[in-house]
Amino acid sequence: MKQENEKYCVECGEVIKINAEICPKCGVRQPYIQTAESEQQKEAQNKWLTTLLLCWFLGVFGVHRFYTGHTAIGVIQLLTLGGCGIWYLVDLIIIAIGNYKDADGNPITNNK
Ligand SMILES: [Zn+2]
């Protein structure tokens, strides 16, 4: 039986790794199957881009903080206009380099 990280070769039916592009047994190239993992990656990348754009355009209002669940910090940034225009710039850099985390501690990054 195949494991969760395995699939059947489309040509010979051999159990191969789910990420395998070519079957090691018969050498036939496997069709690309979009896994749940790559869907999540896409979602994560979209979230990262959204956060970055929100910070870029609306960072002085703390909108990126609200978007990522940091409501309390968002309110503070809203009241201080993005921490006097400095705090949100720091956030922007942190988001851009992929070190930003949402309120649940999930990294918001565009890393593949
Ligand atoms: Zn095969």
Image (spheres, rainbow, N blue to C red):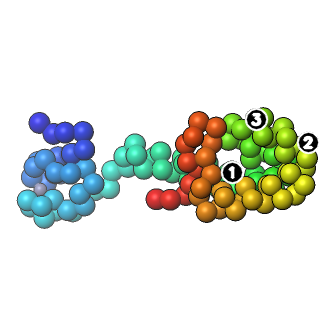
- Separation of marks 3 and 1 at Cα, in angstroms: 14 Å
Q: Amino acid at mark 3?
A: Thr
Look at 69% across and 51% down and name the residue there.
51
112 up-or-down from 64: above or below? below
> Which residue position holds label 1?
51
Look at 9% across and 61% down and name the residue there.
26
Q: Quadrant of residue 99?
A: bottom right
Q: Amino acid at mark 2?
A: Leu
Task: Give the left or right position of residue 42, taking residue 72 as reference.
Answer: left
Quadrant in which ligand 1 is drawn:
bottom left
- Residue 45, image x, y percentages: 56, 53
Q: Which mark is residue 71?
A: 3
Q: Earlier in the sequence, mark 1 or mark 2?
A: 1
Task: Give the left or right position of residue 39, taking residue 34 as reference.
Answer: right
Q: Dot 2 surroundings within 10 Å: few (below 14), some, or many (20 or more)?
A: some
- Quadrant in the picture for the N terminus: top left
Q: Secondary structure at mark 1?
A: helix
Q: Nearer the viewer, residue 81 or 10?
A: 81
User: Can I make out residue 86 in this image?
Assistant: yes
Q: Earlier in the sequence, mark 3 or mark 1?
A: 1
> Which residue position holds label 2?
79
Q: Amino acid at mark 1?
A: Thr
Q: Nearer the viewer, residue 92 or 12?
A: 92
